[in-house]
Amino acid sequence: MRLAIIDCGTNTFNLIIGDIINPGEFKTIEEIKLPVKLGEGGITNKIIMPAAMQRGLDAFGKLCNHAYPFKINKIIALGTAALRRASNAEEFKDKIFVATGVRVGIIDEKTEAFLIAKGVLLTTNKLTGPFLILDIGGGSCEFIICNSSEILWSKSYEIGAALLLDKFKFEDPYLEKQVDQIENLLDTELKDFLDAIERYHPQTMVGSAGSFETFADLIEMEYRNRICDNANENYLFNLAEYETLHQKLLETTLPQKMEIPGMLKPRADMIAIASIITTFVFRKINGRQMFMSRNSLREGVLQHLAEGKKL
């Protein structure tokens, strides 16, 4: 069976096409991502603005049209934080159905964390002890503490990069007081995560795709003049290189960020916030290793279906 999964994220709509080749096993055929910024201008007020809604509709249609030539059996579309929050999410879903015939299902925070973990765990077979999976989205961030076979603790927090960018009107480049403002918010919002750290002691962090892919690309271009190898499902960060990148992202203006080799321009306005979140969390777990996994929710959905389970 050939399935197309569309992950309707707050910043990006992601398509993955995969074949279920054996029980519990799938093969990726195609992947494509389109920037949407569904939360732009309205995420704090829990509404999808007209321009953002049109971008979402256009992107969804393009992804469907991209998928059809692959002779797929079914398109499965899932919405996450932006659609969970938006008061007009049903209007957006109805417009997608009228335009494409595809119904978008909105998943809750627990399901989102579970599917992200399922996807990432496909790439972390060499990690044994408790480790943290961090997925930085536009509307929410998912924190998942697990070992190689099971989730030990998880929670979704509404501290996504788009949400923080919309909530706080930051100066450019970031000032020290603005970094402190974000870190104080994280200290307040993440109290039960900090308690979970004391219980499970994860010292390895695995960043799930998205911003972490951008971090890896920027570092590889800076130090080795190449984009991170797409065949490499896991990327081990050199922590000194990452810390240098973090400082660079804080100290540069948005136009300067957009010119950094390896930067995906749609990510440029939120990448410093993602880096602040990453650095804060890594320090809180007293981190020793940081990886990037290319897998995320979309691979988790395919794996779940390959195992014969229903969403």
Image: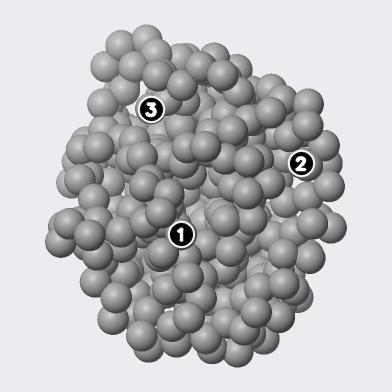
Residue drawn at x 36%, y 47% is: 238
Residue at mark 2: 193
Rendered image quadrant of residue 273:
bottom right
Scheme of image coloration: one colour
Image coords of residue 180 (percent x, y): 72, 72
The mark that comes first in sequence, 1 or 3, is 3
Mark 2 vs mark 3, CA separation in Å: 24 Å
Q: Is residue 9 left or right of residue 125?
A: right
Could you tell me if residue 188 is visible in this image? yes
Amino acid type of the residue that numbered disc 3 sits on in the rendered structure: Thr
Q: Which residue is mark 1?
A: 243
Residue furthest toward the front?
240
Q: CA distance from mark 1 to mark 3?
A: 24 Å
**In screen coordinates, is 25 left or right of 147?**
left
Q: Which mark is residue 1?
A: none
Q: Quadrant of the N terminus?
A: top left
